Image (cartoon, rainbow, N blue to C red):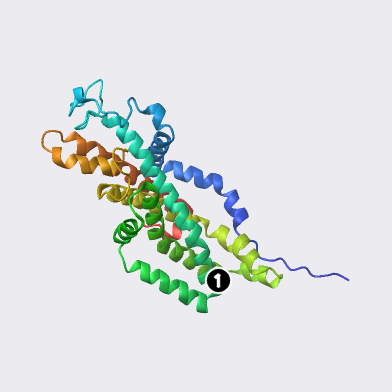
């Protein structure tokens, strides 16, 4: 007597692991994404090793070199207090990267569980989470971040929290959409039929297979957070002088645009380079990890 065995559908994690090398090669062939990855890595390394890279103390005035033009001793010039611009930009990149990475992590820690809850259970949970998301999305991202930072008070920590909270709705929507799509696929139904509990289905089958879309969302959220930190610091709601920040530097450059345009040009270029790098990297990752959402 022979016993028939049923072959259950296999989750695509194994296929993803097998194709990992191919995806890495595809990402390497994407020159724009590779360029973005290199520039982003430079900013991250600069943030990590800012005290070693910066040639001067970013907060130390030098009244003998006030508004000095770019030169061999000060590659990017000095500001109205004689502080070295290159050193301040390097340390300002640390604040930008800190906010960019920590704010996204905060948004994911809150948004992913709520998105899973809304997408998997539906009904009352979905209604409650969706209405909360819609309410937060009624405010533009930067307006919500500015409002929250004003309530919490001016500091880098509070700016990070404000930006992280402002990014939660986008994370909820992405996670909810992926959960709604994945909970009806065959391998999830097979896991349920085999007696898998909600935790097993959510964290062993749905969440791992939603990772690609979430990684792409992270690369979109980081440049938005960098711009948000620069804006909050520019308005006096983020990093407080004399601590360096790209937004603080732009704010201080307003009175010296004519005699010393480099005070605004170099911090502005740093913001553009950082945000462009992560956006290029995000586009490349979207093409490789989530081809359904790729725009060609």
User: Along the line of sight, which residue is nearer the eye, 101 or 21?
Assistant: 101
Residue farthest to the left? 258
For label 1, the residue is 120
Q: Position of residue 179 (x, y in %)?
A: 52, 67
Q: Is residue 104 visible?
A: yes
- 15 relative to 95 in the view: left or right: right
**Total numbered badges shown on the rendered structure:** 1
> Crowding at label 1, few (<14), some or many (≥20) Cα neighbours within 10 Å?
many
Q: Quadrant of the C terminus?
A: bottom left
Q: Position of residue 122 (x, y in %)?
A: 52, 76
Residue at 63% in and 60% down? 204
- 79 relative to 175 in the view: left or right: left
Residue farthest to the top? 72
- 124 relative to 153 in the view: left or right: right
Whether residue 227 is situated above or below residue 72 in the rendered picture: below
The quadrant in which residue 249 appears is top left
Q: Position of residue 222 (x, y in %)?
A: 39, 50
Whether residue 80 is situated above or below residue 255 in the rendered picture: above
Q: Position of residue 199 (x, y in %)?
A: 63, 65
- 256 relative to 163 in the view: left or right: left
Where disc 1 sits, the SS reads helix
Residue farthest to the bottom? 123
Q: Quadrant of the N terminus?
A: bottom right
The quadrant in which residue 258 appears is top left
Q: Is residue 187 visible?
A: no
Whether residue 258 is situated above or below residue 229 in the rendered picture: above
The quadrant in which residue 247 appears is top left
């Amino acid at each position: 007597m022979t016993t028939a065995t049923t072959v259950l559908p296999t989750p695509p994690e194994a296929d993803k692991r097998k194709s990992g090398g191919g995806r890495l090669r595809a990402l390497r062939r994407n020159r724009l994404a590779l360029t973005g990855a290199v520039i982003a890595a430079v900013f991250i390394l600069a943030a990590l090793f800012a005290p070693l890279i910066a040639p001067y103390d970013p907060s130390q005035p030098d009244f003998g070199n006030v508004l000095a033009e770019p030169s061999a001793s000060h590659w990017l010039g000095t500001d109205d207090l004689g502080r070295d611009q290159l050193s301040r930009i390097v340390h300002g990149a640390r604040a930008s990267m800190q906010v960019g990475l920590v704010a996204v992590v905060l948004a994911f820690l809150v948004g992913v569980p709520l998105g899973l809850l809304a997408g998997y259970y539906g009904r009352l949970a979905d209604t409650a989470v969706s209405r909360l998301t819609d309410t937060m999305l009624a405010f533009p991202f930067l307006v919500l971040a500015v409002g929250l930072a004003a309530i919490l008070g001016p500091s880098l920590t509070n700016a990070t929290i404000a930006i992280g909270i402002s990014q939660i709705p986008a994370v909820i929507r992405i996670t909810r959409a992926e959960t709604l799509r994945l909970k009806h696929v065959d391998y999830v139904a097979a896991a349920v039929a085999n007696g898998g509990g909600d935790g097993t289905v959510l964290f062993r089958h749905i969440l791992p297979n939603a990772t690609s879309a979430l990684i792409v969302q992270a690369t979109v959220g980081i440049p938005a957070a960098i711009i948000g930190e620069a804006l909050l610091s520019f308005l006096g709601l983020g990093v407080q002088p004399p601590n360096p920040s790209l937004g603080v530097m732009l704010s201080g450059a307003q009175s010296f645009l004519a005699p010393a345009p480099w005070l605004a040009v170099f911090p502005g270029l740093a913001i553009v380079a950082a945000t462009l790098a992560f956006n290029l990297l995000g586009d490349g990752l979207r093409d490789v990890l989530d081809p359904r959402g790729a725009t060609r």
